[in-house]
Amino acid sequence: MSTLSEKACDFRELLPVCGMDSAQCRAARALLKWTQEELAARSGASAVTIRNFENDRSVPQTGTRYLLQKTLEHAGIEFIPENGGGVGVRLKKRSSAE
């Protein structure tokens, strides 16, 4: 299985799009019914990094957060920005072609 971390990119260009917080990460995993270990395997990040992030012990580097967020988005998660009602996550509506 190929992970997103294997794809080359310049993380400096991605700074504005890495807004996922620890609660959104936990919620996204719950919607997908993924363990921390499964997210780690799919993203290329370590399970310890994910566990520490979700428990608010540390904040991963921007590149790692980007990989986590993009892995979750690729699996169907949509991140909802602050819009007066608070940030959140939801599953994208699947089209009948998917």
Image (cartoon, rainbow, N blue to C red):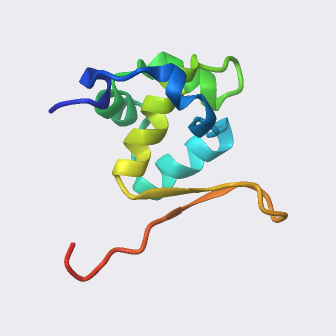
Drawn side of residue 94 relative to residue 91, left or right:
left
Q: Could you tell me how many numbered marks the image carries? A: 0
Query: Which residue is painted at 42% across and 50% down in the image?
Result: 73
- The quarter of the picture where the N terminus appears is top left
Query: Which residue is painted at 81% across and 65% down in the image?
Result: 85
Drawn side of residue 78 relative to residue 52, left or right:
left
Give the residue furthest to the front: 13
Give the residue furthest to the left: 1
Residue 19 on image: x %, y %: 64, 39
Query: Which residue is painted at 38% across and 40% down in the image?
Result: 71
Residue 5 on image: x %, y %: 32, 23
Drawn side of residue 36 relative to residue 1, left or right:
right
- The quarter of the picture where the C terminus appears is bottom left
Does residue 50 sit above or below 25 in this rendering?
above
Give the residue furthest to the right: 84
Does residue 26 sit above or below 98 in this rendering?
above
Does residue 27 sit above or below 39 in this rendering?
below
Residue 34 on image: x %, y %: 39, 45
Does residue 54 sit above or below 30 in this rendering?
above
Query: Which residue is painted at 48% across and 39% down in the image?
Result: 69
